[in-house]
Amino acid sequence: MDKISREFSPSDEQLVYRPAVPDDNRAIADLICQAGGGLYEFLFDDLIPFVTASDIVAAGVGMSGGPLSYENCLVASSASAGIVGVANFFPADSLAEETFLSLVSDRFDHIGPMLRLRDRGSMFLNAIAVAGNYRGNGVGTHLIALTEAASQEAGLSRLSLHVWVDNVAAIRLYKRHGFVEVGIAELAVAPRLPHRGGSLLMRKILPTPSRRIAVA
C-alpha cells in the first residue's frame, strides 16, 4: 500500500489518503464497528467486563499480522477531524476461520456461513466506513478506488465483500461501483444480531491497470 499516492480529495475539504499507522487504531475501530452493522458487538460485547467490542477491535487494529491490523487499512484523514474514513481489506485466502474460534467459538459458529462463503483468489474488502459529516463527499468512492488499485498492485483481479441483505442502500451503492451478487450466507436469527436475510457476497472484476496510484 505504500505505492498508493494521494490522488483524490473531496470537494469541500482537502483530505489525506494514506496507509494507517498503529496510533490510528481507536478511530479505525470505531469506524469498523460502524461498518459491521452490529456484527462486532455481537461477537465481542460482554466477553470481558468493562471492555467493549470497539476496545477489542482497536487492539486487533493496533497489532500486526491479523486481518483487522492497521497494515491492512487505508484511511482518509482530516486536519480538523482526524480519521474520517477507513477501508480494511486483505486477500480472501488469508482469512482463516480458526484465527477467531479459540476466542468466542459459539459466536463465530453462528456466523460460520459468512466466513465460509468467500471469493477465493480475490481481495476481500472487509469494512469501509465514512464518518457521518463526511458522507456524500466522495470519500467512500475514493477509498474503494484506492482499494482496487492496491488489489491490482497485489496481483489480484477481483474485489469482494459481504453486505447485509437488508442493507438495501449499501447494496445499491456497491452495484453502482460495479459489484455483482455472488451468493447469500444464510444466518439463523439471533436477538443480538439485528439483521434479516443473511449476508450477501458481492464481487467486482477489476480492469487491467493502466497506471499505478500511490498514498504519501
Image (tube, rainbow, N blue to C red):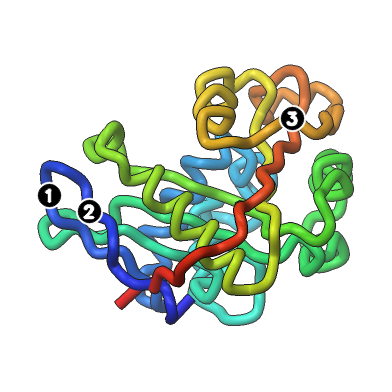
Viewed as shown, does residue 181 lie left or right of 154?
A: right
Residue at left offset 31%, top offset 64%: 17
Quick check: marks 1 and 2 in contact, CB under 8 Å?
yes
Q: How many residues crowd around disc 3 within 10 Å: few (fewer than 14), some, or many (20 or more)? A: some
Measured as percent of width and height from the top left, residue 114 is found at: 81, 42
How dense is the environment of label 2, judged by Cα within 10 Å: few (below 14), some, or many (20 and up)? some
* Amino acid at pointer 3: Glu
The residue that appears at 48% across and 55% down in the rendered structure is: 87
Q: Find numbered disc 3 in the image and state the secondary structure of the residue it sits on.
A: strand
Asked if one can make out residue 60 in the rendered structure from this viewpoint, the answer is: no
- Could you say which is closer to the camera, residue 89 or residue 152? 152
Above or below: residue 131 compared with residue 23: above
Q: CA distance from mark 3 to mark 2?
A: 29 Å
Asked if residue 180 is positioned above or below residue 91 in the image, the reply reads above
Is residue 7 at all visible to an observer of this figure?
Answer: yes
Q: Are marks 1 and 3 in contact (CB under 8 Å)?
A: no
Viewer-side residue, 188 vs 161: 161
Residue 133: % across, % down: 22, 36
Nearer to us of marks 1 and 2 is 2
Q: Which residue is mark 3?
A: 181
- Residue at 51%, 46% (x, y): give it: 33
Residue 137 pos. (x, y %): 25, 37
Residue type beneath disc 1: Glu
Answer with mark 3 or mark 2, whichever residue precedes in sequence: 2
Say which residue label 1 marks.
Answer: 13
Give the structural element (helix, strand or loop) at label 2: loop
Q: Label 1, label 3: how many angstroms apart (C-alpha)?
A: 34 Å
Mark drawn on residue 9:
2
